[in-house]
Image: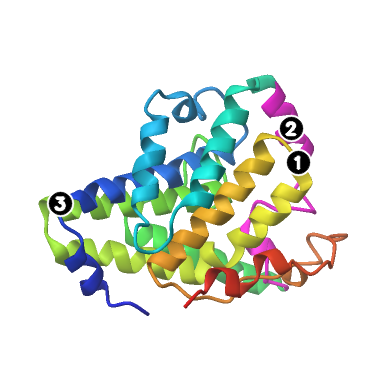
Amino acid sequence: MGVDSITILDQQSAPSVKNLLARSAMYQILSACFLYPEEKNLSMLKSPDFQEHVKDLILCYEGVDDGAELKKCLEEVYGLFTATTIETLQRDYRSIVGHTMSKECPLYETQFGAAQVFQQVHELGDIQGFYKAFGVDTSDVEKERCDHVSVEMEFMHFLLYKQAYALENHGDEKALICLDAQKKFLKEHLGKWAPLFSVLFGRKAGEGFYCALSALTKEFLRLEMKSMDVKTDIYKESDLNQEAVAGASEECLSCVSSEDFNEE
């Protein structure tokens, strides 16, 4: 699976729990931002601790990246969020997503790469298998499918939080289970399709908060995959399920190639 998990844990001392929680919080923020905008969902962006979170998150990737692009993306998201209203965000979100499943930037993993219904069912079952292995299920409140980008982000938030708890309370063995699950979930699911989704979502947004959010998502996932040495075949735009997402552009996405994420 790339870098030995034991090596990573050996390099993590007491501050590593803080790093895990910072990364966990970032997944939680992204998860909330890709839902229909409500005050309660976006409260973390209004928190006075957000700027401190930015500092903590950048420190997570020391030795991997200088964090300059991540810092820029975070500042742009924060600045645009504080300069707009929830009503404007709701209007923009509806414009991007539409009233039915978006053709240009579907929010669901199985609209990428799975051309046949049975393949989609298999992928959904595999995702559910990850969730059930850790005793979690999709929310009855949000009522989103298990392959919704927000749900998958929330699962990564949960795994990182659980890893931090395990390191403090149970030791390396249980923490390793969480780390291995993160790497596998990125490799087989979120890391395969969310980079392309980010580009498509940002393109549909054009400008403003959601365009900046898309850039942040792409950069954050790049750093996550680089720091955990996760390599996977990232979907191209030609991998969109054309039956379900008819009319999507066939433009080549050079800005979201596998090489961008699978760095040596």
What residue is drawn where x is 85% and y is 61%? 246
> Given the image, on which type of amino acid does mark 3 rest?
Ala
> Given the image, on which type of amino acid does mark 1 rest?
Ile
Question: Which residue in the structure is indicated by mark 3?
Answer: 14
Question: Which residue in the structure is indicated by mark 1?
Answer: 96
Foreground of the two, 14 or 113: 14
Tag nearer the camera, 2 or 3: 3
What residue is drawn where x is 50% and y is 71%? 188
Question: Left or right: 262 with respect to 251?
Answer: left
- Which secondary structure lies at badge 1? helix
Q: Position of residue 173 (x, y in %)?
A: 16, 67
Question: Left or right: 206 with respect to 68?
Answer: right
Question: Left or right: 195 with respect to 52?
Answer: right
- Which secondary structure lies at badge 2? helix
> Given the image, on which type of amino acid does mark 2 rest?
Asp
Does label 2 or label 3 sit earlier along the sequence?
A: 3
Q: CA distance from mark 3 to mark 1?
A: 42 Å
Foreground of the two, 141 or 167: 167
Range of magenta residues: 88-115
- Binning the other alpha carbons within 10 Å of mark 3 as few (below 14), some (14 to 19) or many (20 upward) gives few
Whether the residues at callouts 2 and 3 have beta carbons within 8 Å, the answer is no
Q: Is residue 78 visible?
A: yes
Question: Which residue in the structure is indicated by mark 2?
Answer: 92
Q: Position of residue 46 (x, y in %)?
A: 47, 24
Whether the residues at callouts 3 and 1 have beta carbons within 8 Å, the answer is no
Image quadrant in which the N terminus is located:
bottom left
What residue is drawn where x is 13% and y is 50%? 168
Question: Left or right: 117 with respect to 164?
Answer: right
- Binning the other alpha carbons within 10 Å of mark 2 as few (below 14), some (14 to 19) or many (20 upward) gives some
Does label 3 or label 1 sit earlier along the sequence?
A: 3
